[in-house]
Structure formats: C-alpha cells, structure tokens
Amino acid sequence: MRDDGRKRGGKKIAVPVEGGCLAGHFGHCNAFELFETDAAGGGIERSETVEAPPHEPGRLPAWLSALGVDVVIAGGMGRRARELFRASGIEVVVGASGGAPRDVVQSYLAGKLESGDNPCDH
C-alpha cells in the first residue's frame, strides 16, 4: 500500500462518475469519487469528488495510481487500462452497474457488489 497519509490498512477506492452515478464507461467519465476506508476495511471514513483529466490512453491509470488508489470499481473498462492498473498493484472490479457511488462502494466493502460482463471490449 502506498504511503500517502491514509491510515495503515485502509483502502482508497475510485469510482468513475457521470451525472452523480457510476459511469458506464471508465475512460469517458467527467469525475471520480474517491473513498477512503477505515483500517478494518468495513466502512467509509471520507470521500471527495475530483475532476477527471482529459481522456488519453494510459493516462487515467497513472493518474489514479499517483493519487494512491488501491481499488477501481467501474462499469466498463478497456483491456489496456485493466492491464496498467494490475501492473501498478491496483485491484480492478468491472461490470458493476449504476447507482450512487457510495452505495456501490458500500456493497463492495460488504462483499455484496454484483458485477456482470465488462461492456468494453477494446
């Protein structure tokens, strides 16, 4: 885990958002909701919304890694982005369906997040 000021053991989870809900396509969202969990990993300690940089292949994985993200939960994500995240040691969850980002993260933390097929095949 990266040493970026979080409590030891906590995770930072990123959710791409569009219109206040989980974005269907990771690379084309307008913002990310970032959630920091407690050390036990069972609850959210804080969250913030950050504007996404312009879309360029490979940019978002490097940017989120620099922000200390441990997990990315997305609706759809291309193969190359998934590979870049995994190479950085970041867990990728794809196939999650819409809803409020906080609800998506709480489902993930409870082990109840349902994910389906990844709609992005590029």
Image: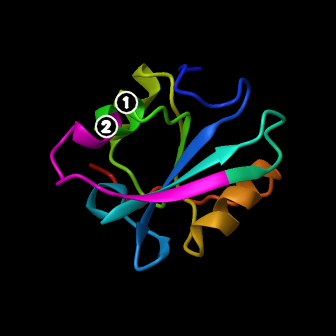
105 or 87: which is nearer to us?
Answer: 105
Magenta run includes residue 50: yes
Tell me the SS state at disc 1. Answer: helix
Q: Is residue 47 above or below residue 99?
A: above
Tell me, for residue 116, which label it has, or none. none
- In this view, which residue lies farthest toward the front? 5
Tell me the SS state at disc 2. Answer: helix
Amino acid tagged 1: Ala
Magenta run includes residue 112: no
Q: Are marks 2 and 1 in contact (CB under 8 Å)?
A: yes
Q: Is residue 55 above or below residue 17?
A: above
Total numbered badges shown on the rendered structure: 2
Image quadrant where one finds the N terminus: top right
Mark 2: few/some/many CA within 10 Å (<14, 14-19, 20+): few
Question: x, y (%) of residue 72?
Answer: 51, 45
Residue 84 horizontal side relative to residue 110, left or right: left
| Residue on which disc 2 sits | 63
Amino acid tagged 2: Trp
| Residue on which disc 1 sits | 66
Residue at image coords 41%, 21%: 87
90 or 34: which is nearer to us?
Answer: 34
Residue at image coords 74%, 59%: 106
Question: x, y (%) of residue 53?
Answer: 22, 52
How far apart in space, not on screen, are marks 2 and 1 (Cα)? 5 Å
Mark 1: few/some/many CA within 10 Å (<14, 14-19, 20+): few
Residue at image coords 70%, 29%: 7
Question: x, y (%) of residue 102?
Answer: 65, 65
Please state the extent of the stretch shown in magenta in the rendering.
Answer: 46-61
Residue 92 horizontal side relative to residue 25, left or right: right
Question: x, y (%) of residue 17?
Answer: 43, 67
